[in-house]
Every structure is written in C-alpha cells, then in structure tokens.
Image: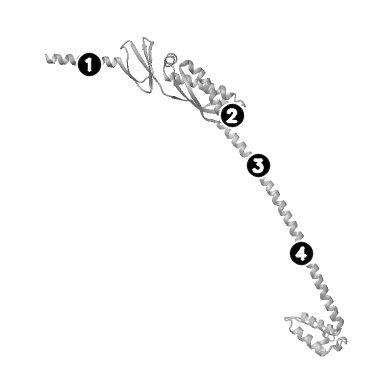
Amino acid sequence: MKKASLTLVLLLVGILGIGAYLTLFTVYETQQALVLEFGKLKRTIAKPGLNYKIPFIQDVVFLDNRLLDLDSAPQEVIAADQKRLVVDAFARWRITNPLLFYQSVNNEFNARSRLSDFLEAALRRVLGAASFEAVVRDDRNDLMRKITQEMNDNAEKFGMTVEDVRIKRADLPEANSLAIFRRMQTERQREAAEIRAEGEEASRRIRANADREVTVVKAEATGESERIRGAGDGESNRVFAEAFGKNPDFFAFYRSMQAYESALQSGDTRMLLSPDSQFFQYFNDATGAASGPSSSLPKSDRNAASRSLSTTP
C-alpha cells in the first residue's frame, strides 16, 4: 500500500514538473519575448522575469533586447568629384517593435541581411553626393547623421531602429593611392631640385661677391704697398743722391766694394778680365790711383768702407 502511494506521489510530481516545464518560461534582462497562439500575437513581454504560457497552444519567441552590431564589408564608392573611395562602415541597431520585426524578417540573420543592403545603399547615395574632402575630413559627422536617418527610414518598416553609423576607414583604392603617392613624390623631388638650384645660385652669387671683394682688397693692398715701396725707394734714392753729392769719391769706392762682394762669392767663381781693368783698380792700388777719380778719397774713409763691407753678412 505504501509502495503504491509513493509511486502515485512520484507520478504526480513528475506530471507537475512536466506541466511546469511546458507552462513556465523565463525572460532574461537581455531579452524580450512574444507569446504567440497559433501564429497570432497574444502578448509582448519586455520585462525580465518568470512568465507562463498554455502548453501545446502557445509558443514563445525570444528576441534580443540589446544594442546590436552590424559590420559591413568594405565597398567602393564614387564621390561627387569622381574620386573612388573604399569605405568600411559599421552600424549599431536594436529591435524596437518585436511583433513587426518577427512578422517582417523573423530572425536576426534576415535582419542583418536587410540592414546591410540599407547601409550599402545609404553609403552610395549620401557619399556619392559629397566630395572627397567632405568624406575624409570636413563633413563626416553630418554625412553619418544623414546615412543614419536614411537607414532608419527603411528599418522602421521592419521594427528596427538604427542608433548610429560610423565609418572605420575611407580611403582611396590601393592603385589610386600608389599613383597619388608617386605624384606627390615627384612633386617633392621637383621642389627639392628647385630649392637646391636656388641654394646653388645663392652660393655662387655669394662666392662671386666674396671673390670680387677679395680681389678689390688685394688690389688696394697691392697699390698701397707699391705706393709705400715707391716712397721708400724714392727716399732711398734721395739719401744716396745726397751722399753721392757730398763725397763722390767715397761713393765710388763704396760701390766698388759692393761689386767685389757680389762678384767674388765663395765657390768656383771664375772671371776672365784684363789685369788693368777698371774693376781691379782697388786691387792694384788701395787708393785707386790707377783710375784717378777715387785717388782723392781719404784713406780713413776707404778703410771704414772696407770694414763696413767685411762686417756685412
């Protein structure tokens, strides 16, 4: 009897467990649910918690309640100035009308496919009406708002709302980028060549001015030195002329001593002269009497001149 009662209790507990499993369901914080009865909406559950349904009659469809991502593949867009751009964009969206979403696209996979088409079309229309500079630099935020609004105009029909659209990358195609890089490189090389040429021209101009100034300074210095040398030579000639005028005999004797010193150097010096030549007048006679003019020179002056020449290095 006890065994039959225990079996009955266990059977009732099992039936209750199965009934609870088929009747009760949980909606989490990240979800929203649709309770459908033979495909018709009975109620929408947006708050998390424990809920119920009629087994075998009602079904529950769970939908995500979070902000969802949509990452599109990079695509080529032609801007208003006919420049090609490779645009890589992404969007943030959520399900705002669960019933309309379920009736139109049924699940997230179909929803992402539709949104990708909307995003691609909006990118082509909005960016195709803007210039390259506006897309890359100037008006990107305004363009993103326009793309978001255009996507929402289409997504609302499917129970979805696009919160934001952003461009991760907007750049020229690789072939165009390479061509632009080469053109920029050529322009920089040309500018560098022009700058080098200008620098070389300035260098030659400065060097020519410096050379001219050096030539002028050297010419002025040479002229000044020649003037000073001429003045010195004039003064020297004047002194010699005065000395010659005071005592011509002593001057003749002094010049003869200088001639001997210059002509009769140490070494193998050979001269072929007649013994009675005037050059040897002071060799034959210390007074130079053979020549006559120097005979009147006092002996003391001739001795002094001889000593002066002997001490000359």
Q: CA distance from mark 3 to mark 4?
A: 44 Å
Check the image and report above or below for 97 versus 166. above
Q: Please give the label number shown on residue 191.
A: 3
Q: Is residue 54 left or right of residue 243?
A: left
Residue 15 point in image, percent of width and height = 23, 14
Q: Mark 4 or 2 closer to N-term?
A: 2
Residue 286 point in image, percent of width and height = 81, 89
Q: Mark 3 or 1 closer to N-term?
A: 1
User: SS class of the residue under badge 4?
Assistant: helix
Q: Please give the label number shown on residue 14.
A: 1
Residue neighbourhood size for the residue with mark 1, other residues' Cα within 10 Å, grouped as few (<14), some (14–19), many (≥20):
few
Q: Closer to us: mark 4 or mark 2?
A: 2
Q: Mark 3 or 2 closer to N-term?
A: 2
- The residue indicated by pointer 4 is 221
Residue at 48% x, 17% y: name it.
156
Please identify the residue farthest to the right as the structure is shown. 292
- The residue indicated by pointer 2 is 134
